[in-house]
Amino acid sequence: MHFALDHRAEPDPAFVPPSLRLAEPSDAPSGERRNRYARWALHERLGEGDVVALLMRNQPDVLAIWQGLGSVGVTVMPLDLTLRGTALARNLDAIGPRHLFVDAGLAETLCSVQGLVSVQPLVWWHGGADFARIDLEIAEYDDAPLAPQALPARRA
């Protein structure tokens, strides 16, 4: 299949990005998981100016990660799951994440960038792997809401 581009692509003003759709309302991330991710980020000394990239399929925990890390000032950047090799490596280099959360089913995608990236984020697996699993790591943290004084001060 070939595509010819005879002019630069321009953003479509009518485009509306797809929303996160959960299979069941009961699949919505709990506030407890969000709080655990926030506490994990604080423990890792992550905050405003830090980036965590996600190489994850659409699932309820993505929203909990986004909300939890975002609540302490971390920027969460989802990666395009269609990218491989050099394109994905360039994307990772441009983002420069400190941590990378990877859906265990996307291990082959991550392997496609080995040796091509200049950044070396700490990789955390989500499900499936036997080591460095973020979904198991957060179980070690309290799930109660964070007190306002526990949140880092926002930069102006």
Image: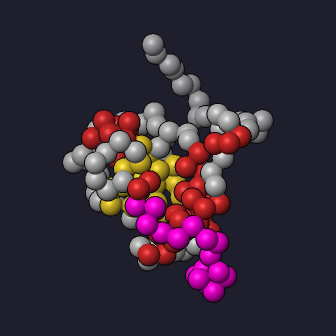
What is the x, y in percent for residue 23? Answer: 64, 34
> Could you tell me which quadrant the N terminus lies in?
top left
Relative to 93, 146 lies left or right: right
Q: Quadrant of residue 99?
A: bottom left
Residue lying farthest top?
A: 1
| Residue 92 visible in this rendered orientation of the protein | no
Q: Looking at the image, which is closer to me, 17 or 15?
A: 17
Q: Looking at the image, which is closer to me, 69 or 131?
A: 131
Mainly helix, strand or loop, the magenta region?
A: loop
Q: Residue at x 47, y 50 (%)?
A: 54
What is the x, y in percent for residue 109? Answer: 34, 37
Q: Is residue 151 magenta?
A: yes
Q: Residue at x 54, y 25 (%)?
A: 5
Q: Residue at x 55, y 39 (%)?
A: 58
Total marks drawn? 0
| Residue 122 visible in this rendered orientation of the protein | yes
Q: Quadrant of residue 107?
A: top left
Q: Give above or below for 115 relative to 109.
A: below
* Start-end of magenta stretch: 137-156
Q: Give above or below for 74 relative to 17.
A: below
Q: Looking at the image, which is closer to me, 131 or 12?
A: 131
What is the x, y in percent for residue 103? Answer: 42, 43
Q: Is residue 8 magenta?
A: no
> Could you tell me which quadrant the C terminus lies in?
bottom right
What is the x, y in percent for residue 19? Answer: 69, 40
Q: Quadrant of residue 153?
A: bottom right
Relative to 105, 19 lies left or right: right
Q: Residue at x 34, y 47 (%)?
A: 89
